[in-house]
Amino acid sequence: MITMLLAHLVAALVAPILVRAVGRNAFYPLALVPAASAVWLATIDPRTLGEAPREVAVPWIPAFGIDLAFRLDTLSWVLALIATGIGAIVLLYCARYFKDTEPGLGRFAAVLTAFAGAMVGLVLADDVMVIYTFWELTTVFSYLLIGHYQDKQASRRAALNALISTTAGGLAMLVGLLMVASSAGTLRLSAIVADPMWQDPGPYLITAMVLILAGATTKSALLPTHFWLPGAMAAPTPVSAYLHAAAMVKAGVYLILRLAPALTHLEILSIILAVLGAATMLLGGWRALRQTDIKLLLAYGTVSQLGFLAAVAGLATHDAVMAGLAMLIAHAVFKAPLFMVVGIIDKKFGTRDLRVLSGVGKAAPVVAVIGIVSAASMAAVPPLYGFVAKESIYTALWEAGGWQRGLLFALVAGSVLTVAYSWRFVVGAFGPAPGAPRVASARIPVLFWLPPAVVALGTVALPFVTAPLEEVLRAYSSVLPETGEGIYLAVIPHLGVPLLLSLVTLGLGAALCAVAKPFAKLQKKVSPLTWASEGAMDAFDAERGFRRILRSTDALSVAITPLFQRGSLPYTLGTMLVVLVALVAPVALTQSPLPDNLVLFQHPAEMLVLPVAALAAIGAARSRRRLRAVFLITVTGYAVAVLFLAAGAPDVATTQVLVETAMTVVLVLVLRRLPIHFSRRPLRIGSWGRWGIAIATALVLCGGTLYAADARYREALGKGLIEPAYEQGGGHNVVNVTLVDARVWDTMGEISVLLVVATGVASLIFVTRRERPIARVRDIDSSRTSIWRRRADSDLPQNALDFDARPDEVAGGNRWRTWLSAGLTLAPERRMVILEVITRIVFPMMMMFSVYLLMAGHNLPGGGFAGGLVAGLALAVRYLAGGRYELSEAMPLQAGFVLGAGMALAVASGVLPVFFGGTIFAQVTPVVDVPLLGELKFPIALLFDLGVYLVVVGVMLDFLRTLGAQIDQQQEADADAR
């Protein structure tokens, strides 16, 4: 199962490359992944999964008991087969639906493939945290797919509606899942629903289940969050075909079915689900009859069908669950081809408006047959499979008796509307349109109509295999209580009330079709659009109400934000510090003045360093010059490094020195665009207030640190980590082993933050485009480029001012001598020959030292972070000595590429142990015998450390390119403008 998910991940990653290579035909090889998954699932007998499900678990976060746990039982088998089978066919359909020139086609292919994998992962996951992870992945991927057409406001709005609605429900679901997991004492959903606690549920469990069902109802677009699903029609039609038939909207129904053993004991929640489902079915059917866009008609039809499925699944009885599963399969095999047929019509005839489409049935007879058969199954016309599934639902509800018979009549009313909008679709899409010219015949390739034909074939073929299909569905529903005499999937049902209701449904649906025009006038007359006020419409139209809530939230934030965020950094920082002091001070006043075991100093160096740090800090606060303040702050950082060194922490001291140096370089680069002096504060009271806040904050932080150290009640862990660091981590440097092994997840998060920071800084500087081509010396046109940037009054010979990158033996010796690759790109008065000479000597030594720190960090002070900082500082030296062209010569790679390579290596170091039978980020230490060198150990942590090294180098390179080279270019442009 894990291999199946990894295959989808790999396919998603290579999808953009394939699309770039072969265009839209890339969807064919991409379809092989879900197709192979479907074939593998088809080789498993689902009847055996009821009693002996297949399970696999890989420890993920053992400290919290979270595993990558997957479980294949009958229910997950059915949903996974639908997701993979229809997913493969939709990908095949995409190969003919899109053109090679489609914007963002590579991104679309990757996201759609990943979406299919996320849906499969969702239905297979058993750990509640893994379920939630895949749940939100489907939300994110659907957001990207719905918003594929980024230039269209409708697409962006629809994507945002779907994201907010389903994310809100997902967060509620997460809280509910954690509540029931806490009560059951396990994170495995299969164990949670089977726990005896459900036999006597109290308010706590009922609240938890309500929260979980909130997530399910928003995901499956039940009232009142049904509006996001019709809006999702802004997405390309293949997305609609997959989203509605096999993917995200089925996730809510799946979760309800998965919770059925627990819902059995919560009848009140079953009634609530039944009411919501029936109301959604009626509203969706009613709205579908008003649509003139056939795609939107099907979308509201999906809303109606999801209400139907949720109402039945929520009953949580043996017969209802079996019938609901049968209907879920039916919906997949008739709704996917219907949307694909709409896509064909839209592409070939240029419209989806049923008032304009006329004669499509004659112009495209094969497509018409596919659409008519699928629509007939949706309307439950015998002997198609849609009829078999709906008849089983009627029978289950009738045999259950009680209030379920009331639900049955509501669902019959909804099914009457289903028949009517199915007929409206058929006539509108394939019949004549009054007053509209007949459409011209169009050539439709076989590979375009074949995918919907294959899926539609299921609605014709499944009635012939109802007996084995019934056995499969009973393998899951058998664990639920039985009501009535039991039901069967039958093409020819027994005479009785359910069959009579099916005939009534078709008869009333046909009658409604016959009075379509009067009924449309009735709908228009009772519609709130004709009589409700503007304000009242928000109550009747869920989407308008939702938009009003968003606008109100925005207005509230606009009113509140200025009270706390005035655009002043000192004000914001001062507010935060005052709150900190106000929270901590009352607690501090209740403590003794100082801890009893206070030691004034441990090393004589502290008495020398602390006054220097204090004077530097005071000087920085009083400095009027920005550059002086930066250097004084750097002094305080170096003083802290000395304290670390005196405390016996060379690793931390080294990192502190390197970070302070790097920050000094960055700040100096930034200061070029800022005034030399800080602004004056005319009010003395403001100055005293700042000093007061600073002193109070210092006292609180120092006091908190003292009391926190005094609160230790266990022995320090340091001594106990020395031996495990070597035996388990394979290194003598406890600090480095901890960072890249024991606390590797923390380090992974930290380098992710570094990547985000680098991206943010670059986004602020590169307003239009981040990854610009790297300008190398050899690429410069020497005939048009002069040395950057000489003063206007410079009295220099012309041969010194012309840029010439040719070697001396060609260009001649009457030229300025350079020690660096791009030295000639600097104006003579901007060059420092001594700095160039030093850089030429120091740069290779610094790079060698950075590699040494990287390789030695597992046993000696160093590591990937320190090594990366040294390499970044080496690049900074090259830039300061030779300018932006010199930086390009030193590192002719994009910063984004280096950052991405580092993150890829870090992730790979976590995934690789899984392939060798270990867990994620498990320590593996291959030993290699090398001639002359002897036995060498290559711990997998070295690969992670190399990733950290590259991320840090990428961050420094990004800073140098954005705050250095880019500002250089801006200054050149400013000089040219003057």
Image: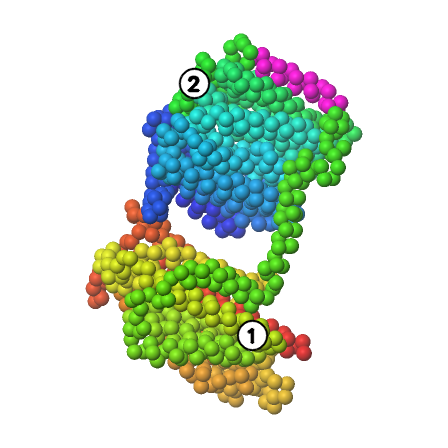
Where is mark 2, residue-wise? 482
Name the residue rendered at 22%, 66% in the picture.
Answer: 933
Residue 515 magenta = yes
Single out the mark in the foreground, 1 or 2: 1
> What amino acid is labelled 1 in the image?
Ser
> What amino acid is labelled 2 in the image?
Glu
Q: Residue furthest top?
A: 495
Q: Distance between the Cα atoms at labels 1 and 2?
A: 78 Å
Compared to residue 358, the image places residue 902 above or below, namely: below
Name the residue rendered at 74%, 25% in the picture.
Answer: 522
Q: Residues within 10 Å of mark 1 (few under 14, many from 20)?
A: few
Mark 1 or 2, nearer chain start: 2
Q: Position of residue 835 (x, y in %)?
A: 45, 83
Name the quadrant of the C terminus: bottom right
Q: Nearer the viewer, residue 374 or 122?
A: 122
Q: Which residues are magenta?
A: 499-519
How many dots with numbers? 2
Q: Secondary structure at mark 1?
A: helix
Q: Is residue 119 visible?
A: no
Q: Is residue 594 visible?
A: yes
Task: Say whether residue 706 is left or right of residue 432.
Answer: left
Q: Secondary structure at mark 2?
A: loop
Q: Main secondary structure of the magenta part?
A: helix
Q: Position of residue 808 (x, y in %)?
A: 48, 84
Compared to residue 172, the image places residue 885 above or below, namely: below
Q: Position of residue 748 (x, y in %)?
A: 40, 56
Name the residue rendered at 62%, 17% in the picture.
Answer: 506
Residue 892 magenta = no
Where is mark 1, residue-wise? 687
